[in-house]
Amino acid sequence: MSNKTVVQLLLLLIGVSLAFGMSKAGDLPADEFARRRAIFLNELRDLDACAIIHSAPYFERIIATESPYRQDSDFIYLTGWPFAEGILVITPNPADSEQVEVTMFVAERDPKMEIWTGPKAGLAEAAALEELDQAQPYDKFFDQLEKMISGYDRLVISYGNDAEFQMDLSEALKHSSRRPTLVQEAAALLRSYRLIKSETEIKALEKAIRITGESLVDAFKIIPRLGFEYEAQAEIEYGFKKRGVVRPGFPSIVGAGKNSTYLHYEDNRGALVAGDLLLMDVGAEWDFYSADISRTVPISGIFSPEQTLIYQLVLDAQLAGIESVKPGAAFREPHNLAVEVITTGLVDLGLLEGQVDTLISQKIYRKFFMHGTSHWLGLDVHDVGGYLAPDGQPHILKAGMVLTVEPGIYISEADDVDPRWWNIGVRIEDDVLVTTKGHRVLSAAIPKTIKDIETLMQPSNVKK
């Protein structure tokens, strides 16, 4: 082997190594994205369709200061490429064709800009991605657009929420004589894939959930010593960061006292007062997959009698909902069971009056439980899939789906409610995987019984 050949091989290996380190989504293996693209390509071939999938844009907060970048979920699902200014183009051809089928347009590396930002992947790194036919400069996309999309009946498109690209592409298509006759949103096709998680995806979710749980437990132990909601938030998110998390999966909800009765409370500035509850709805993101966990604890470390009754009722409803998760069950079944348990319990406590069936059919229970019990979980905390399947019928659970189960009771101050119940807000949320035989609670290790929470919060368990 000549010296020249050795050098060429070394350069190739360096390029592949750099691409693997800079372009893939964290710990996810590179062939995971190649596998997803292959499945999507086959569906496009059956539809006589090509696809254009765009990355998320940068959002400039002020001049020369951008908000932290997070890649579009559909784009990251198919590419593993975490950088802006990327376009994936899939142009299926007959099996015996040698034409290009998978192309990535990416921004070229800019040494001057990298002085400010540090290294970013570019053409060489994209070209090394597995099962990618070619990489092209981002600014050459529109030069090649008409040639790439001609001959197809359908164009499947995801704009990545980039309004400028959407406008430019719409204008280019308007003036194209060879454009496909039908344009379809990619999300309609990709959601069926994203609903069923691979083993790799489940491992990413498990890690996000484990980190979330460990960070919550750290916070539980010191909450009696804290003074404000933002201190609890800081402790939780510090737990994320010290465990290697890039970002939370969504803005943390940390509400105490009456703030615990607001479903998506935002301020996190209120005081922590002994005797009140603290509701925390938080989730770390790992490899772009988000956990979503809610726990409610007594700020003093001990639940009051009224808080105990409401908390246990929510927990009973949640356990009933989780038990119903299995292949073949309707997506709404956990909610229906949670509603039945909560409505019955509220009647027993005197907070509602009437027949349980009537209170449910007339949705009177929504005075205290006004949201759904489940949503899908994955690359987005409220993941794709919706509440209805593509045929318009309710989703039926299948192995590989991941959903939350999160009933709650929220009692605000009201003239027709005994003051002893005022400002009690409880939500308990876990992340549940549908398995072939039933389900597995991915967040089962995070304490949620009254005994376990009170034990963790006792002074002997608090950091000195």
Image (spheres, helix red, strand yellow):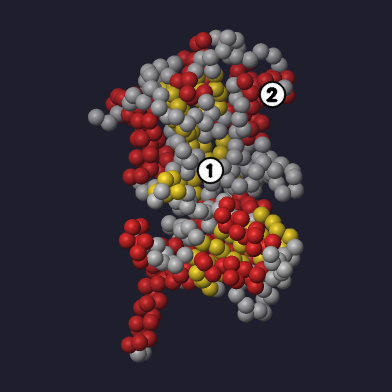
Q: Is residue 68 visible?
A: no
Q: 366 or 329: which is nearer to us? A: 366
Quarter of the rendering occupied by the C terminus: top left
Q: Counting other residues with Cα less than 10 Å from the Cα at mark 2, is it few (<14), some (14-19), or many (20 or more)?
A: some
Mark before the other along the chain sequence, 2 or 1: 2
Give the answer, above or below, for where 166 lies relative to 316. below
Q: Nearer the viewer, residue 282 or 66?
A: 66
User: From the image, which quarter does the N terminus lie in?
Assistant: bottom left
Occupied quadrant, residue 324: top right
Give the amino acid at mark 1: Val
Kindly state the secondary structure of the residue where label 2 is placed.
loop
Q: Position of residue 307 (x, y in %)?
A: 48, 18
Please report the residue visible at 57 percent of the width from the left and 36 percent of the height from the top: 405
Which quarter of the picture shows residue 217?
A: top left
Kind of residue indicated by mark 2: Lys
Mark 2 vs mark 1, CA separation in Å? 27 Å
Residue 186: image location, x then y, percent:
64, 56
Identified at 63% across, 53% down, the residue is 187
Could you say which disc has been placed on residue 228 in the image? none
Question: Label 1 crowding class (10 Å Cα cut-off): few <14, some 14-19, many 20+?
Answer: many
Q: Which residue is mark 2?
A: 363
In the rendered image, residue 297, in percent from the top left (x then y), is placed at: 43, 26
Q: Residue at x 33, y 58 (%)?
A: 116
In-image side of 251 versus 330 (left or right) = left
The residue wearing badge 1 is 381
Verify CB contact (< 8 Å) between mark 2 and mark 1: no
Q: Is residue 309 above or below residue 263?
A: above
Per the image, label 1 sits on a secondary structure element best described as: loop
- Residue 390 position in % (x across, y down): 72, 49
Front-lying residue, 120 or 446: 120
Q: Is residue 72 left or right of residue 51?
A: left
Depth check, front residue: 162 or 334: 162
